Amino acid sequence: MSSAPNGLHPYPIVQAPMAGGVSGPPLVAAVCEAGGLGFLAGGYKTADGMYQEIKQTRGLTRRPFGVNLLLPQTAHADPAAVEAYRGQLAGEASWYEVSLAEEDIIGTDDDGYDAKLAILLEDPVRVVSFTFGCPDPAALARLRAVGTYTVVTVTSADEARTAQAAGADAVCVQGVEAGGHQGTHRDDPQTDGTAGVGLLALVTQVREAVALPIIAAGGVMRGAQIAALLAAGADCAQLGTAFLACRESGAHPLHKKALTDPMFPHTELTRAFSGRPARGLVNRFMREHGPYAPAAYPRIHHMTAGLRKAAAAAGDPQGMALWAGQGHRLARALPAGELVEVLAAELAEAQSALKVLQMRRAS
């Protein structure tokens, strides 16, 4: 096992684990077969559902791939705030003719973490990453004992130090540009609107804080960006939105189209859909309800599940959670394997140009 995550695959390109059916076996296998590292999203499904996807992926590729787990959330939501938001969404429920009962597809509020971890210890995959916190040192040690490389998502140098102290093999450094949920270890509503560091600055901060390999994530859409991140101290780059538009992606067709649709020119962080800060394309739902959404993940996520499904079924992107990073307008609707190859070629070209520039300056 290499000491750096890019030692597991030819290219320093990682496909982000995108929950909700986006990064399923077809996408993961295509990325792996092309020389990147694909990740299954273990979140928002049962432990058995996760295991079935692992088996399907193994049937599509023999190359190493990863699985991402969501850490259980210990903060308790204010019941009054949750009920107030339920009232805020009453008009949406009436319009889409759905209930605001809190759907929980796995039966608990911890995303079935213990059961999923048990499966990954019994039948290991090569890489396991964690989001929304840092596992305890014992869990990381047990995964290492079965040959699994562990990665903890971090959004600050302090979180990276925590991951290193716990025994993680690497950190996934997530900049504020990233689409979907911010992987902060502690959800603090007092920092809404002010928290978050850009990826290049954050990679530099983490590089000077810890000795762990770095996977850099956030707004990365081109090979030249990967080259810049490697030059800044990252070992590889993780891309989510870039793979969202691929044909193998499980994203809804309206979501894929919205990435480059002039109707959705920019992104913002919002709690509107899940109760936790997440970056998505600004639409009607986000504008109308974002300011009122409480810090109540995963209760709000479960509450809005029916609304999001109904909006998708009705062909209404204005009511969907259109997760996307700040680079979404650069999305390319290529097959995933071809996208990996294009990114690798762009990376090689950028690195070659940099070498030429360095030689000229030295002469």
Image (cartoon, rainbow, N blue to C red):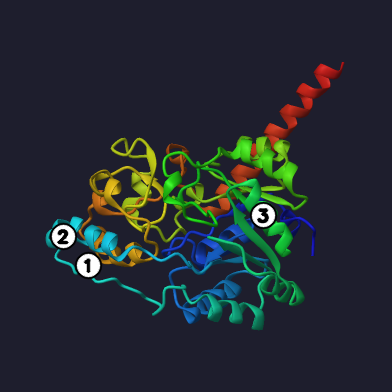
Q: Position of residue 327 (x, y in %)?
A: 47, 38
Q: Position of residue 253 (x, y in %)?
A: 34, 54
Q: In the image, what residue occupies the spot 37% across and 56% down?
A: 295
Q: Give the SS element for disc 2.
A: helix
Q: Which residue is mark 1?
A: 100
Q: How many marks?
A: 3
Instruction: Kindly report the distance in space between the C-alpha atoms of the residues bearing marks 3 and 2.
Output: 41 Å
Judge left or right: residue 187 versus residue 121.
Answer: left
Q: Residues within 10 Å of mark 3 (few under 14, many from 20)?
A: many
The amino acid type, in three-letter code, at marker 3 is Val
Q: Position of residue 185 (x, y in %)?
A: 55, 57
Q: Give the SS element for disc 3.
A: strand
Q: Position of residue 291 (x, y in %)?
A: 29, 46
Q: Which residue is mark 3?
A: 171
Q: Nearer the viewer, residue 85 or 35?
A: 85
Instruction: Kindly report the distance in space between the C-alpha atoms of the residues bearing marks 1 and 2.
Output: 8 Å
Query: Do residues under tags 3 and 2 come within 8 Å of each other at their CB atoms?
Result: no
Q: Residue furthest right?
A: 363
Image position of 184 with respect to 287: above or below? below
Quadrant in the picture for residue 162 = bottom right
The amino acid type, in three-letter code, at marker 1 is Leu
- Which is more N-terminal, label 2 or label 3? 2
Quadrant in the picture for residue 63 = bottom right
Judge left or right: residue 192 versus residue 7.
Answer: left
Instruction: Kindly report the distance in space between the C-alpha atoms of the residues bearing marks 3 and 1.
Output: 37 Å
Does residue 124 appear in this view? yes
Nearest to the eye among marks 3 and 2: give it.
2
Q: Nearer the viewer, residue 330 or 167?
A: 167
